[in-house]
Image (spheres, helix red, strand yellow):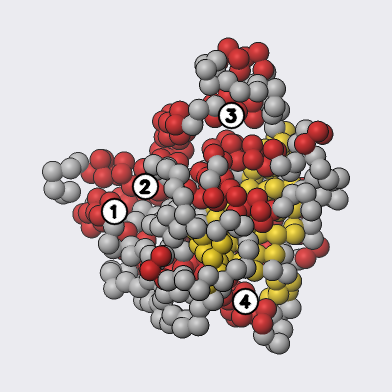
Amino acid sequence: MLGKAPRFVALAGVLWSRFPTCQAWSGRSGAHYVLRHDMYPSPSSTRRCPWRIRSTATATDEACADIDVRVCDAAPTSNILDPTFSFDQIPPPADPAANPDDDGFRNFRDNAPVWFQNAICNLGVLRFLVDSLTYISAGPAVLKQHPGSWETFLQLSGVPSFLVSLLVDSTDATDVTKFGGYEAIRYGSHAKQVMHVWEPQAADTHQQPPKTMVFVHGGAWFSGFPAMYRLLAKPGLERGCRVAIVGYRTYPDTDVDGQADDVAASLQAIQSKYPSSPIVLMAHSTGCQVSSLALLNQPHQSRANVKSFIGLSGLYHVEDHQLFEVGRGLDQISPLIPANHYTIDNWNRRSPTCIVQTSHSDMTLPAMYFVHGAEDMVVPYSASNKFAQALLQHNESSDVGVRCKDIQCHVLKDVGHTETVMECMFGGKTQDVVFDLINPYS
């Protein structure tokens, strides 16, 4: 038993934690830092082996002593080295076992039957509950926190202007004619294989053709859909970009391989429909792993228009993250192990960091940009730093391997996991950094 708390209460807490927009959001100010190397070793754990995987999961990576830290205050991508900077300004990556907010999850993991935890994940019960919670509660709650966002959401959903005026409180109203609805573009036969695409208004387009900003959501492999991230279209449209939000199959309908195939197919569909438009591929959380795999596994001609990748709070090393989930108490209910094919060897084949570290093929990737919150308690910022370091080492090596046109890793002070994507929607330093990297008018 879970003490005095019923198990369904603990399960509700798990669902609340796993779903990004259910968590509290608050805008916080502070400088952000560009780190070129890993700052701390990967998380490790001696907890019990979850899902009965076939070998022991350990992390033996050592910290890199030579760290080049670049501090950006006014200009997000300035390369001004601040001699007064101290590592005390950035906390170490999150310790998964130290967060008291996860005590309920650990109790649930340790007391609920393993078969039950696995079943609600593998049978799609978890997905149903989380996606339903978004529609009923979490999504409306987030929109209510930000005046004017309901109106924008309705506009982007294609609701006629006169209905928007009737549905939205006039005290919150802004310009009801600014945004238009989306076009749903299907790239496969499954219901989730669809993109929502918005075109910038002609007056807002500073270039011909406009850049296409493609966003791939996260959701721990099992949840998420385009409507949930619809407000991301607003800042892109305001800056003259075409915006596409990609939906893809989630677990248990498919695994990570199928999700990467979906992202690759969506990019091919966009490239075919807009052949002269440069593409900026942006993703969040587990969507970063899926999108990176799509870039690494596809031939160059199928992604030739992708000029840059921007990973927000991204996961790139499956084994490291599995250890982190063990510490949080989420390992039995998370789809990580089955979606990535159970064994550590299979995890490494689906880990962009490992693919780059062991690659012996000549490959050119677009510019790779990473944006991560220093306070991330879901995916530690060492995940982005580690992948960036692997790419940087290949770039500086004379051997054949993966090459990138540019590599940057931005660690944002006082920013958590969900805040990177929320600040992109509603404003904040993450949005400033991201759209400086996109630079839509150049």
Residue flagged by tag 1: what amino acid is it? Asp
Cα–Cα span, label 1 and label 4: 34 Å
Residue flagged by tag 4: what amino acid is it? Leu
Of 391 and 186, which appears nearest the observer?
391
Residue flagged by tag 2: what amino acid is it? Ser
Whether 353 is drawn above or below 121: the answer is: below
Compare marks 1 and 4 and give the one earlier in the sequence. 1
Residue 102 image label: 1
Give the secondary structure at mark 2: helix
Query: Would you say the residues marked 2 and 1 are in contact, meaning their CB atoms lie under 8 Å apart?
Result: yes
Q: Nearer the viewer, mark 1 or mark 4?
A: 4
Cα–Cα span, label 3 and label 1: 32 Å
Query: To which residue does mark 3 refer?
Result: 153
Query: Would you say the residues marked 1 and 4 are in contact, meaning their CB atoms lie under 8 Å apart?
Result: no
**Is residue 148 rendered to the left or right of residue 265?**
left
Circle 1 Cα neighbour tier, 10 Å, few/some/many (<14 / 14–19 / ≥20): many
